[in-house]
């Protein structure tokens, strides 16, 4: 069993996104990313299924051609090879937990 106290793991860096790999196993990868207002993770593709969970704050999430305004406790699912990314809204910090699973 693993337990992650997300409150203690949240860290912000002024010059870039904070990225913390919480678990890296063949069957599931979990990462925590913390963004200051205006910081973003540009859309990119991956050959894996992805759940983006907005832990804290507000942001704009991109999945394919769709843009979703999301705030705390929102989950966004993305299928393999679909461009995905997110950006902290102006004046808002954003914390995203990404859960990635392999395609079978």
Image: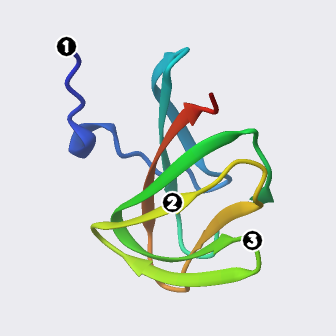
Could you give the CA–CA distance between mark 1 and mark 2, rounded to whole angstroms?
25 Å
Q: Position of residue 19 (x, y in %)?
A: 56, 39
Q: What element carries label 3?
A: loop
Depicted 46 relative to depicted 30: above or below? below
Q: Which of marks 1 and 2 is in front?
A: 2
Residue at image location 27% in from the left, 67% down from the top: 73
Figure colour scheme: rainbow
Task: Please tell me which of labels 1 and 3 falls first in the chain.
Answer: 1
In-front residue for pair 95/74:
74
Q: Which of marks 2 and 3 is nearer the N terminus?
A: 3
Residue 64 badge: 3
Q: How crowded is mark 2: few (under 14 residues within 10 Å), some or many (20 or more)?
A: few
Q: Is mark 2 on a helix, strand or loop?
A: strand
* 33 sits to left or right of 64: left
Q: Local crowd at mark 1 within 10 Å, few (<14), some, or many (≥20)?
A: few
**With respect to residue 59, does 18 lie above or below?**
above
Q: Name the residue under label 2.
A: 77
Q: Do the residues labelled 2 and 3 touch (CB within 8 Å)?
A: no
Residue of label 1? 1
Q: Distance between the residues labelled 2 and 3?
A: 11 Å
The residue located at (62%, 28%) in the rendering is 104
What separation in Å lies between label 1 and label 3 (alpha carbons)? 34 Å
**Residue at image coords 48%, 26%:** 28
């Amino acid at each position: 069993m693993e337990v992650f106290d997300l409150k203690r793991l949240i860290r912000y860096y002024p010059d870039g996104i904070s990225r913390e790999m919480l678990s890296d196993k063949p069957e599931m990868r979990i990462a925590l990313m913390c963004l200051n207002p205006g910081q973003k993770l540009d859309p990119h593709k991956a050959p894996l299924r992805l759940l983006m969970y907005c832990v804290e704050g507000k942001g704009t999430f991109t999945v394919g051609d769709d843009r979703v305004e999301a705030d705390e406790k929102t989950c966004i699912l993305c299928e393999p090879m679909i461009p995905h990314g997110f950006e902290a809204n102006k004046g808002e910090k954003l914390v995203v937990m990404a859960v990635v699973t392999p395609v079978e």
